[in-house]
């Protein structure tokens, strides 16, 4: 007797839900972006591996990304992806911590540079593959090519927005590594992390035109949804019991009424925020372009080779955002690493590079980023996947 598929996640677009079918995950939405980053057959993964092998990063620089097989369509109807199989990461020796710190720095750089968001802890896996490589990366990629200027926008680091600060702290993706790197991380690992962040950004900038050409060469590029999140899922869940601000749009009310969590998207090169209006996903409507309606954030331009003024802020302010997230009151004095040195004074943070270039900022970065260290340990587990958590042991809401 054939087993029924196990339903996963929320309902979107006329009752469509992700489902586990044996050794495959069925996803009734586009898989293009996941295929591009998580398949060894994708032109982007091949470019990154080839360029890294010829560059200072080394041939296995992006070996931390999950590598999966994809089946079926990559259009809006969706397809299937193999179920990820990893063993838990158990080692906590110095070599493992250094490797993991490097991976965290590269991850923050890669996802920020590519404009990938929604990388909360439930969307990330951490483990060891059959080749004994550490794997740390997302399972779902629906938001990409956003023009980001800080790593907090990926949700790997906690945003300091006072309305969502506690939620962002609990859900930030890098909390997955804390059982192995410690609370706080050792300054030696923090030096490695910052160095990897900076060197990976430089690598991506050097190859930006080649990466843009990969995206431009995708036949499906302009027809593939880029998801737009107007609100968090938690807001929609609570919409039946309390009024939301800003008020629900008619398109949100319509989707909630049929039992769906509202789903919106943009299309590359086209204006406006779109949504599906029929069960076959063949009819698309658009929110008004004018008036008191949500506006789209900037998107990276392929015609400019993915170059953007925000890249400078990502290199400099983004570096301090990383430091602010992992900073701890016990850090003091000057610490020298292979790629840079860090000086922690009572009020300031100073980064010095071998060239003599120096960057300095106030040590109080709470207006820009939250700390990854929390007194609770919910979600800070050594398992490959984060167990479902609704309320942490300290009584705070998590995700």
Image: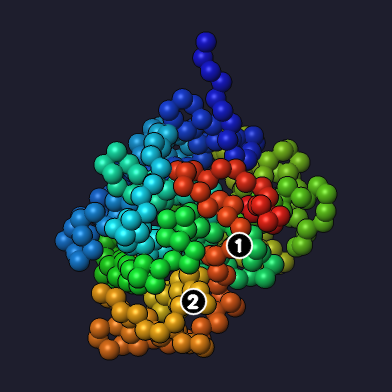
- Going by the image, does 9 lie left or right of 207? right
**Marking on residue 135:** none
- Going by the image, does 3 lie left or right of 37? right
CA neighbours of label 1 inside 10 A, class few (<14), some (14 to 19), many (20+): few
- The x and y percentages for residue 255 are 70, 44
| 175 w.r.t. 36: above or below | below
| 113 w.r.t. 15: above or below | below
Q: Residue at x 59, y 52 (%)?
A: 378
> Is disc 1 placed on a helix, strand or loop?
loop
Q: Is residue 36 visible?
A: no
Q: Residue at x 19, y 64 (%)?
A: 55
CA neighbours of label 2 inside 10 A, class few (<14), some (14 to 19), many (20+): few
Q: Residue at x 50, y 36 (%)?
A: 27
**Marking on residue 330:** 2
Q: Residue at x 53, y 65 (%)?
A: 372
- The x and y percentages for residue 91 are 36, 50
Q: Is residue 191 visible?
A: yes
| 323 w.r.t. 154: above or below | below
Earlier sequence position, callout 2 versus callout 1: 2
Q: To which residue does mark 1 refer?
A: 375
Q: Residue 358 or 381: which is nearer the viewer?
A: 381
| 354 w.r.t. 289: above or below | below
């Amino acid at each position: 007797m054939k087993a029924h598929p196990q339903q996963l996640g929320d309902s979107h677009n006329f009752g469509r839900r992700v489902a586990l079918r044996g050794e495959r995950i069925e996803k009734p939405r586009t898989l293009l972006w996941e295929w591009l980053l998580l398949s060894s057959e994708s032109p982007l993964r091949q470019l990154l591996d080839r360029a890294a092998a010829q560059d200072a990063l080394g041939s296995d620089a992006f070996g931390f990304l999950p590598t999966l097989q994809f089946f079926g369509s990559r259009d809006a109807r969706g397809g299937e992806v193999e179920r990820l199989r990893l063993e838990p990461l158990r080692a906590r020796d110095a070599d493992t911590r250094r490797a993991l710190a490097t991976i965290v720095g590269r991850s923050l750089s890669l996802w920020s540079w590519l404009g990938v968001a929604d990388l909360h802890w439930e969307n990330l896996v951490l483990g060891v593959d059959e080749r004994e490589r550490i794997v740390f990366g997302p399972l779902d990629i629906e938001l990409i090519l956003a023009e980001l200027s800080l790593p907090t926008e990926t949700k790997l680091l906690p945003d300091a927005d006072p309305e969502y600060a506690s939620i962002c702290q609990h859900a930030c993706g890098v909390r997955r590594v804390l059982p192995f790197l410690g609370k706080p991380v050792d300054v030696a690992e923090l030096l490695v992390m910052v160095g990897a962040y900076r060197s990976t950004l430089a690598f991506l900038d050097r190859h930006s035109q080649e990466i843009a050409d990969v995206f431009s060469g995708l036949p499906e590029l302009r027809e593939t949804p880029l998801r737009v999140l107007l609100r968090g899922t938690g807001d929609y869940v609570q919409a039946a019991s309390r009024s939301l601000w800003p008020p629900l749009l008619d398109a949100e009310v319509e989707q909630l009424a049929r039992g769906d969590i509202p789903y919106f998207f943009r299309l590359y090169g086209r204006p406006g925020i779109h949504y599906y209006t029929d069960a076959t996903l063949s009819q698309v409507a658009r929110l008004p372009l004018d008036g008191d309606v949500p506006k789209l954030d900037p998107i990276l331009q392929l015609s400019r080779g993915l170059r953007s003024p925000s890249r400078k802020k990502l290199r400099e302010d983004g570096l301090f955002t990383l430091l602010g997230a992992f900073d701890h009151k016990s850090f003091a004095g000057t610490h020298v690493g292979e790629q840079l040195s860090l000086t922690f004074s009572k009020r300031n943070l100073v980064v010095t590079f071998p060239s003599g270039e120096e960057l300095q900022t106030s040590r109080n970065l709470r207006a820009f980023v939250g700390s990854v260290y929390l007194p609770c340990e919910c979600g800070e587990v050594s398992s490959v996947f984060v167990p479902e958590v609704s309320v942490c042991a300290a009584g705070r809401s998590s995700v």
